[in-house]
Amino acid sequence: MNKFKDDFIFGTATAAYQIEGAANEGGRTPSIWDVFSKKEENVFMGHTGDIACDHYHRMKEDVKILENIGVDSYRFSISWSRIFPDKDKVNVEGVNFYKNLIHELKERKINPAITLYHWDLPQWAQELGGWENRECIYWFKDYCTKIFEEFGHDVSMWITHNEPFCASILGDYLGIHAPGKKDLKKALIVAHHLLLSHGIVVRELRKFKFKNSNIGITLNLSPTYAVSKKSEDVRAAKTSDGYTNRWFLDPLFKGHYPEDMLMVYQKEVGILDFIVEGDLDIISTDIDFLGINYYTRNIVEYDEHSQLNFRGVEGEKEKTAMGWENSPESLHDLLTRIKKEYTKLPLYITENGAAYNDVVTTDNKIHDIDRINYIKVHLKVMLDFIKEGGNLKGYYVWSFMDNFEWSFGYSKRFGMVYVNYESQERIMKDSAIWYKNFIKTRSLEV
Ligand code: GCO
């Protein structure tokens, strides 16, 4: 049978800074992404999230589109600086925006899945040292506690962090995301504090004893393959896997950082003295599910010139507009590995999808066959994994609508819904129509 069970969750996802706009409205103050995107050359053509999809003003219309697609669940994130525009100041207007959003969704039987942190740290927090400052964990805890107080009875799925790898490594080591730093030690400190804050917030939510309340974290995971069997390439692949995957999975599920990576990092930055006794117990606090964002695989080779001695190699499979290979088999490898080496907890694909160069036809249609195929082949391997006994419970397409794709600005379109950024008109692409029909039957013709 090529059919998903009725209780399998089909959803779609977005993030606050990527869609909301209204950057200076409703009492919101800037986040690190407002500041970063306004600095020259950080983002394609100087694009910013100032207006984005104007979702802040079009929320009701957008929820109606979600209802039309028929998703079971909608994953979105909360903008921290809408809730706390300043360290000790709660903004009721911000709280109300999300209260209304949750209400609209629930009226239409769409289950909200909330990401608490999707990279938009308030600028006030950055000015106090940001995630490099251990205190930031407690500012985050205060913000999450407020969110739980307000929405805890209405929300059954919480994600503490989205992709701590990107938030730390891309933001503080590679400098291509906010806050735009290039310092490995700082990035490792940020990563550690993100993980620690995850554990602390999980414990905080448990204190409320809400009836139907699940909390987890979302990691971006990429299976990593060596380009050849040469021992130096195999070693490079192991380091790359440690850097992207194990540095986050091991502390969460095994309660320690991977030994080989501790050696690699200590050689580069000295003793990791920011890891304090007791931290790993907190990081490995029991959670209810693991969220996985999966887009592509990594192929790597040895590189004597790069700091960590590996570099990515281009693969031969068909690519999306991001230049990422469409590699569904690697999702199967990934899920199997998680089940075998890490956890039997419920898994959710919290993001999967593709950017393509969509063309609007003269009759206002978007025939995005490539996107439909990309989604289908990934659904197929998910079915295989489930048949093999895998505990996979849900799938969220990235993204609901085209949006601000971080350093690529609006140049990359990931949506099932097309956004005309001039008129803010939304058009359901063929993929949205396909997903709608698919969700009705839950069966995949392949
Ligand atoms: C991420 C984020 C999304 C991206 C998506 C496409 O994974 O980077 O969670 O915000 O837009 O992944 O790159």
Image: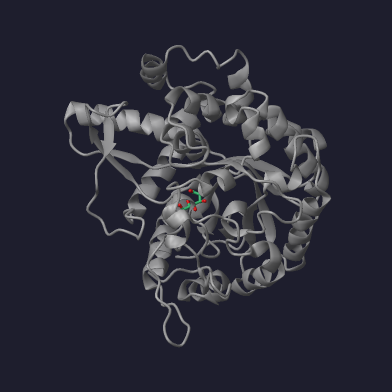
* Render colour scheme: one colour
* Above or below for 87 versus 24: above
* Above or below for 46 versus 3: above
**x and y percentages locating residue 42 in the rendered image:** 45, 46
Residue extending farthest to the bottom is: 363
Residue extending farthest to the front is: 40
**x and y percentages locating residue 16 in the rendered image:** 62, 53
Q: Quadrant of residue 120?
A: top right
**x and y percentages locating residue 78 in the rendered image:** 67, 49
Q: Quadrant of residue 285?
A: top right
Residue shown at 37% from the left, 18% from the top: 268
Q: Quadrant of the N terminus?
A: bottom left
Residue shown at 16% from the left, 30% from the top: 230
Classify residue 56 as left or right of residue 345. right
Q: Quadrant of residue 129?
A: top right
Front position in the image: 122 or 344:
122
Whether residue 375 is visible: yes
Residue shown at 53% from the left, 55% from the top: 48
* Above or below for 196 versus 365: above
Classify residue 8 as left or right of residue 209. left
Q: Quadrant of the C terminus?
A: bottom left
**x and y percentages locating residue 80 in the rendered image:** 69, 44
